[in-house]
Amino acid sequence: MIEVIENRRSVRKYQSDKPVTKEQLNRLLGAAMLAPSACNTRPWEFIAVTKREVLDEIARTHPNAKMCETAAAAIVVVALPQTEGISVGFYPQDCAAAAQNILLEAVSIGLGTCWCGIYPREECIALMREIFSIREPKIPFCVIPIGTPLFDPKCRGFFEESKITYIE
C-alpha cells in the first residue's frame, strides 16, 4: 500500500486520446464507497462524467480544474450534510476519505487524478450546483479529473519529523 501512496501525484496533463472506461470508473467509485464515515452514515453521492462538453465546462468555470480540458473523465463528490445524531458535521471528513480512496485506487490501475476542491468556496459551490443541478442541502464537495497521465510529475511530499510530537 505504501507504494501506491508514494506514487500518487496531482496530475494536470492527460493523454486526451485514452478513454477512462465505465468499468474503471466503477472500480474508483467502489473504492470511494469503502471509505470510513462517521457512524457509517456514508454522506456522499457521486457524479461520473465522461461527456466532453461537461468536462470542458468544468475546465472553463472552476478556477483550479483547467486540467479537465485533457482529462477523459471526472468524478464529482457530492456531500450530504443532513446527517443527524452523533455524526452531525462530519461529512467533510467522510467525503475527503472517499475522495482519497478514489485517488489511491486510480494509481493502482494506472490512472492519474487531481483533487480540485469545491467546498467550502461558495463561488465554486454555486458554479458546480449550476452545471450539475445539485440542489440544497446537497453540497458539491470536490471534482476529481481522471485520465492517463501525459507524464509523471515529481513527488512533492516527504517525511517531516519536525511535525511530529511523540508522547512516550
Image (tube, rainbow, N blue to C red):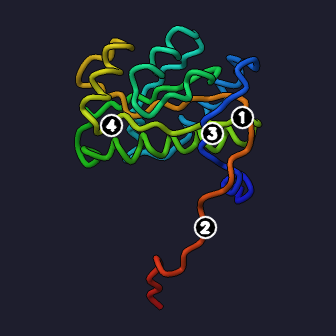
* Amino acid under disc 2: Phe
Q: CA distance from mark 1 to mark 2?
A: 22 Å
Tell me where residue 151 sits by quadrant.
Answer: top right
The disc placed on residue 149 is 1
* Amino acid under disc 3: Val
Q: Which residue is mark 4?
A: 119
* Residue at the (43%, 26%) spot, across then down: 45
Number of numbered labels in the structure image: 4
Tell me where residue 101 sits by quadrant.
Answer: top right
In this picture, residue 134 sits left or right of residue 57: left
- Where residue 125 sits in the image (x, y, percent)? 30, 27
Using a 10 Å C-alpha cutoff, classify the residue at mark 1 as few (fewer than 14 neighbours), some (14 to 19) or many (20 or more): many
Disc 1 on helix, strand or loop? loop
Q: CA distance from mark 3 to mark 1?
A: 6 Å
| Foreground disc of the pair 2, 4 | 2
Tell me where residue 6 sits by quadrant.
Answer: bottom right
Give whichever of discs 3 and 1 has the lower sequence position. 3
Give whichever of discs 1 and 4 has the lower sequence position. 4
- Where residue 145 sits in the image (x, y, percent)? 56, 29
The disc placed on residue 11 is 3
* Amino acid under disc 1: Pro
* Amino acid under disc 4: Tyr
Q: Is residue 155 above or below residue 137?
A: below
* Residue at the (72%, 34%) spot, across then down: 149
* Residue at the (76%, 36%) spot, across then down: 109
